[in-house]
């Protein structure tokens, strides 16, 4: 986890970035989330920060990370930026969808290809299903068509002679 000083520097970078974009927001707060801090932006008009399917928010995360690495060094700790809990809600919905697809793959004893999704969304699916013993995940496709394939793996019991 980054130090309080590093978190304050990251918050100032986010504030400067939003100011340069002339985007209005009411507050930025930092929350500890499992393995990394999440900087939560509160904004009345969050559509301009989130974009269609979170594309603006993903771009903001990428650009602010690059700025932070340049200003604070290449070893700056991992952090995330969210707007009005958009990513958190998306993660919850994706967790449910991934679990449902895993159940479907299990019941059909086959592979299920999910719709194309962002790298963040693919990471969530891989993470959610990583400890499920009879399910494997892999990413397939290129660019905007990259998606997760969920595969049921029935490991037969070894036979005893």
Image: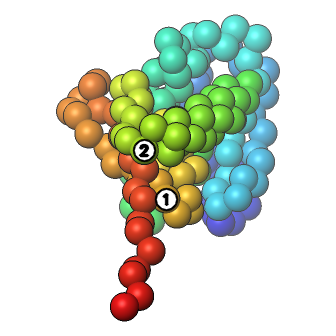
Q: Residues within 10 Å of mark 2 (few under 14, many from 20)?
A: some
Colour scheme of this structure image?
rainbow
Q: Position of residue 33 (x, y in %)?
A: 72, 53
Residue at x 39% of width, y 81% of height: 159
Which of the image's four quarters has the N terminus?
bottom right
Residue at x 54% of width, y 52% of height: 129
- The extreme bottom residue here reads 161
* Residue 2, image quadrant: bottom right
> Is 46 rendered above or below residue 27?
above
Depth check, mark 2 against mark 1: the one in front is: 2
Q: For numbered disc 2, what is the local secondary structure?
A: loop
Is label 2 in contact with label 1 (beta carbons under 8 Å)? no
- The extreme front residue here reads 161
Label 2: which residue? 109
Q: Position of residue 49 (x, y in %)?
A: 58, 18
Q: Is residue 80 visible?
A: yes
- The extreme left residue here reads 142
Q: Residues within 10 Å of mark 1 (few under 14, many from 20)?
A: some
Q: Position of residue 38 (x, y in %)?
A: 68, 45
Q: For numbered disc 1, what is the local secondary structure?
A: loop
Label 1: which residue? 134
> Is 154 rendered above or below residue 158?
above
Residue at x 36% of width, y 40% of height: 111
Q: Position of residue 36 (x, y in %)?
A: 64, 57
Foreground residue among 57 and 144: 144
> Is 5 rendered above or below residue 108?
below
């Amino acid at each position: 986890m980054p130090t309080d000083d590093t978190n304050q520097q990251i918050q100032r970078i986010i504030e400067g970035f939003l100011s340069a974009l002339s985007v209005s927001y009411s507050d930025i707060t930092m929350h500890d989330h499992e393995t990394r801090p999440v900087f939560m932006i509160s904004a009345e008009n969050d559509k301009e920060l989130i974009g269609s399917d979170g594309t603006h928010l993903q771009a903001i995360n990428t650009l602010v990370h690059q700025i932070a690495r340049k200003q604070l060094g290449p070893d700056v700790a991992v952090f995330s930026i969210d707007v009005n809990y958009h990513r958190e809600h998306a993660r919850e919905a994706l967790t449910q969808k991934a679990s449902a697809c895993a159940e479907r793959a299990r019941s059909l004893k086959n592979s299920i290809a999910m719709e194309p999704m962002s790298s963040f969304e693919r990471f969530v699916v891989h993470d959610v299903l990583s400890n499920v013993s009879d399910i494997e995940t892999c990413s397939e496709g290129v660019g905007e068509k990259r998606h997760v394939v969920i595969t049921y793996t029935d490991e037969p019991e070894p036979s005893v002679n």
